[in-house]
Amino acid sequence: MTRKHFTEDFRKEAVRLALNSDLSRHQVADDLGVGHSTLGKWISAYRHDDLMSGPHDDMQKELARLRKENKILREERDILKKATAFFASQK
C-alpha cells in the first residue's frame, strides 16, 4: 500500500472545510479521500500553529490596555503608601 502525499494547500483547505462547514469531520474526510485520524491530526496541527503564530491584533490591544491599567494601579498604590506614611507621622 502506498502513502498519499497531500500538498500544504490541500491540508489547509481540508482543515478550513472541517472547521467551517456544516458537514461532520467524518463526512469531510470521506469526501476528500483522507483518513479520519489524518484529518484530526491536521486540525490539531493547525490549531497549534495558529496559537503559536505570534501576537494577534486583539492581543496587542489587550496587552496595551493591561500595561496602561498596571501603570495606573502602581501610581495609585504609591499615592496610598505616601498617604499612609504621612498620616502615621501625624500622631
Image (cartoon, rainbow, N blue to C red):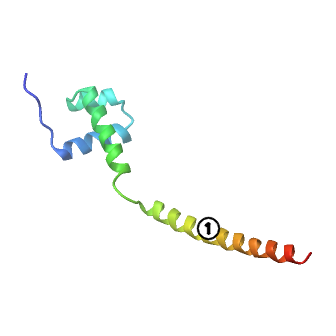
Q: Quadrant of residue 17?
A: top left
| Residue 34 point in image, percent of width and height | 21, 29
Identity, as a three-letter code, of the amino acid under mark 1: Glu
- Tell me: 3 left or right of 83: left
Q: How many marks?
A: 1
| Residue 11 point in image, percent of width and height | 22, 41
Task: Write the residue at 51% across / 64% down.
Answer: 63
Check disc 1 and report its element: helix, strand or loop: helix
How many other residues sit within 10 Å of disc 1, few (<14), some (14-19) or many (≥20)?
A: few
Q: Is 3 or 63 nearer to us in this picture?
A: 63
Task: Write the residue at 19% across / 45% down.
Answer: 8
Mark 1, residue position: 69
Q: Is 50 or 74 nearer to us in this picture?
A: 74
- Tell me: 15 left or right of 81: left
Farthest-out residue, right:
91
Residue 52 drawn above or below residue 1? below
Task: Write the residue at 7% across / 21% down.
Answer: 1
Farthest-out residue, left:
2
Residue 57 drawn above or below residue 14? below
Q: Is 15 or 77 nearer to us in this picture?
A: 77
Picture quarter with the C terminus: bottom right
| Residue 56 point in image, percent of width and height | 41, 60
Q: Quadrant of residue 16?
A: top left
Farthest-out residue, top:
1
Residue 31 drawn above or below residue 54? above
Task: Write the residue at 34% across / 44% down.
Answer: 48
Q: Quadrant of residue 41?
A: top left
| Residue 36 point in image, percent of width and height | 28, 27
